[in-house]
Image: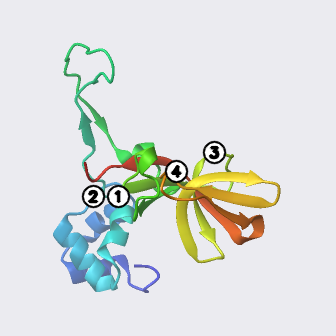
Amino acid sequence: RQARGVSLRQLAAQVDLHYSHLSKIENGKDTVGKNALIRIAEELDVDADLLLSEAGYQAMPYRIVGDIAAGVPIDAVEDVESFDLAQVFDPREHFLLRVRGDSMILDGINDGDFAIVRHSDQVRNGDTIVALVDGGEATLKRYKLAGGTVVLTPANDEMQPMSYSAERVEIRGLLVGVLRTSV
């Protein structure tokens, strides 16, 4: 709003909101409904999705309803708590990438899944990373630095590791989680 040179009162009048309510939204002390958000985005000529993170809007967190054994069965006891993905993976420090391809299937990362990546250029051998090769080709692979050579290894026995001189590879992030979208 400020970058567009629109006063709080002007915008409030244009989108049919009280200026004090709009002020609370801007200061993170109140949330905005979907229809009002769309009106604000249209009036300011910005993407409504961009405003979602800046207007104090938060999606409903997932419910964790208890624990499940991955070994010996345990008692089924419902103990509800909430899980907000944005609280665990801060959006200012992490980003999501939709996985395309099957080079990481042995690590349980499938085509269509979302890779949760922490911004970082500091990684260790064996980490799964997001790398740019030659400034343009992005890939998700296991990382190994040997001398001046970076080896990017897929987790798929049908594919071969790729080797590059270290200056050709830019590390963009470290894989910290996966959201499965298929079975």
The mark nearer the N terminus, 1 or 4, is 1
Q: CA distance from mark 2 to mark 3?
A: 43 Å
* Depicted 180 relative to depicted 53: above or below: above
- Which label number is shown at residue 175? 4
Per the image, the residue denoted by label 1 is 56
Residue at image mark 3:
126
Amino acid tagged 2: Thr
Front-most of residues 171 and 89: 171
Quadrant of the rendering where the N terminus is positioned? bottom left
- Residue at image coords 68%, 63%: 163
Crowding at label 4, few (<14), some or many (≥20) Cα neighbours within 10 Å? many
Q: Are marks 4 and 3 in contact (CB under 8 Å)?
A: no
Distance Cα–Cα, label 1 vs label 2: 6 Å
Q: Residue at x 71, y 59 (%)?
A: 150
**Callout 4–callout 2 Cβ contact below 8 Å:** no
Give the secondary structure at mark 2.
loop
Q: CA distance from mark 4 to mark 3?
A: 11 Å
Question: If you read the primary sequence from the N terminus, does the residue marked by circle 2 or circle 3 appear first?
Answer: 2
Circle 3 — which element?
Answer: loop
For the residue pair 140 and 49, the one nearer the viewer reads as 140
Q: Disc count in the image? A: 4
Amino acid on which the number 1 mark rests in the picture: Gly
Distance of label 4 from label 2 (alpha carbons): 32 Å
Residue bearing the label numbered 2: 31
